[in-house]
Image (cartoon, rainbow, N blue to C red):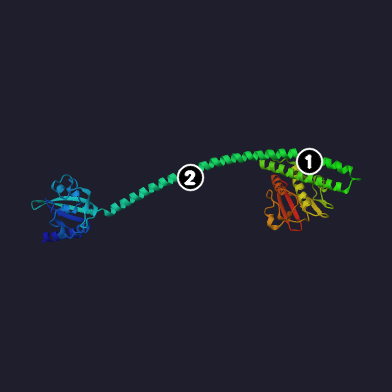
């Protein structure tokens, strides 16, 4: 009874095993094949049992000594028994699949029975293939990216070289421009001085007896000389600022005396019946600033006030010293600055749209801003079209 139960248990295990199980005799004839093996090879049991095991192996493997393991290697065990090996199987439909074969030998009723345990490797092999393909694809991508990176690096190197050459050329052109501006500005001063001197002599000789037309044209010459001198001064100032050559030289001086002299000097350039009115607020008058830079700032602001205001108007020029700061203001009643232009006002070469034919380079306020900045000053303004403009420069006392 126990033997029968053991036999039934063994049969149940074989029939329900996940892997395929095949048993053959010494001649390679299949004696048993379980359902898992039938499913792998796509045969019914009665199609395999009694047949030579080579029917389950593809050509030419079933004729090769090292592959005909179900027949020749079973008959001549060699070292395959008790070991596993990857081999190929042949399905009923002719398709081939890989599997791992484990062999065992059993002595039964005086004869040898060989058992093969079959584990399908199709999924594992497919996963390996995909992994290899993916690895190969990654290698291709890496190679492509490497080539692309090399190309990009080479392009960057070329761009760097071109940029370096361009910068060298730009630097050289900048130096040439600076030398030209400096030379031209200095060279123009000599003939301008001669022209102004000649105009002054003509004016002096014809002041009482000369025709009105001569006096009119002499005034035009003087105005043209003044305008050209301002332009040259602006370009020289800009050249120094751009080259970083403009230094700040602080000194103590009397702001009231200084401003009074500037106001008197600028009054000579004012239009007919234009009045420059100077006023100081505060009990102190001594400041510590760069006198030349400050004079340039004030002259630029008053010059603009003169240009953009009409005849018979007043220009308010005020200074103030309090505990925290020095404050300079210049206010006119001229054409004002359109709101759309105000954000660009301090840009070099920018001029508001309402300046018309009034001469100017658009450099003055840029220079004022930068000169004031060198002395830690802040420039602000308030302007309304046709109601004038107020400029304020504030310097910290520290």
- Residue at 40% in and 48% down: 141
- Residue 214, image x, y percentages: 86, 46
Q: Quadrant of the N terminus?
A: bottom left
Q: Residue at x 50, y 43 (%)?
A: 155
Q: Nearer the viewer, residue 105 or 316?
A: 316
Q: Residue furthest left?
A: 110
SS at circle 2: helix
Mark 1 closeness class: few <14, some 14–19, many ≥20 residues within 10 Å? some
- Residue 61 appears at what percent x and percent y? 20, 49
**Which sits earlier in the primary sequence, circle 2 or circle 1?**
2
Above or below: residue 379 compared with residue 170? below
The residue carrying mark 2 is 152
Q: Position of residue 128 (x, y in %)?
A: 31, 51
Relative image position of residue 198 (x, y in whole percent): 83, 40
Of 302 and 14, nearer the camera is 302
Q: Which mark is residue 192?
A: 1
Crowding at label 2, few (<14), some or many (≥20) Cα neighbours within 10 Å? few
Q: Secondary structure at mark 1?
A: helix
Q: Is residue 17 left or right of residue 353?
A: left
The residues tagged by marks 2 and 1 sit, at their Cα atoms, a distance apart of 57 Å
């Amino acid at each position: 009874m126990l033997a029968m139960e053991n036999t039934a248990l063994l049969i149940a295990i074989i029939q329900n095993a996940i892997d395929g199980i095949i048993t053959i005799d010494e001649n390679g004839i299949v004696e048993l094949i379980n359902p898992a093996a039938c499913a792998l090879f796509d045969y019914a049991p009665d199609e395999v049992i009694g047949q030579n095991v080579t029917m389950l192996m593809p050509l030419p493997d079933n004729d090769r000594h090292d592959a005909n393991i179900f027949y020749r290697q079973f008959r001549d065990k060699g070292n395959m028994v008790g070991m596993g090996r990857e081999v190929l199987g042949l399905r009923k439909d002719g398709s081939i699949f890989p599997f791992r074969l484990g062999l065992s030998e059993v002595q039964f009723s005086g004869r040898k029975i060989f058992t093969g345990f079959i584990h399908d490797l199709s999924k594992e092999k497919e996963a390996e293939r995909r992994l290899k393909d993916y690895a190969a694809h990654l290698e291709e991508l890496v190679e492509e990216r490497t080539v692309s990176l090399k190309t990009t690096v080479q392009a960057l190197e070329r761009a760097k070289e071109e940029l370096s050459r361009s910068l060298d050329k730009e630097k050289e052109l900048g130096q040439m421009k600076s030398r030209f501006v400096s030379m031209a500005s200095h060279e123009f001063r000599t003939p301008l001085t001669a022209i102004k001197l000649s105009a002054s002599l003509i004016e002096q000789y014809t002041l009482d007896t000369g025709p009105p037309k001569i006096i009119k044209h002499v005034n035009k010459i003087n105005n043209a000389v003044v305008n050209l001198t301002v332009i040259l001064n602006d370009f020289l100032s800009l050249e120094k600022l751009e080259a970083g050559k403009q230094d700040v030289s602080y000194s103590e001086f009397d702001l009231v005396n200084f401003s009074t002299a500037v106001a008197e000097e600028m009054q000579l350039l004012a239009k007919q019946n234009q009045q420059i009115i100077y006023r100081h607020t505060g009990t102190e008058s001594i400041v510590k600033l760069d006198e030349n830079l400050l004079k340039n700032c004030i002259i630029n602001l008053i010059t603009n006030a003169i240009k953009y205001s009409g005849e018979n108007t007043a220009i308010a020029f005020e200074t103030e010293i309090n505990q925290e700061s020095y404050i300079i203001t210049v206010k006119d009643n001229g054409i004002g600055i359109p709101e759309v232009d105000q954000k660009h006002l301090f840009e070099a070469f920018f001029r508001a749209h309402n300046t018309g034919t009034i001469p100017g380079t658009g450099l003055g306020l840029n220079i004022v801003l930068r000169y004031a900045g060198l002395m830690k000053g802040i420039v602000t303004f308030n302007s309304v079209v046709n109601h004038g403009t107020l400029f304020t420069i504030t310097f910290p006392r520290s």
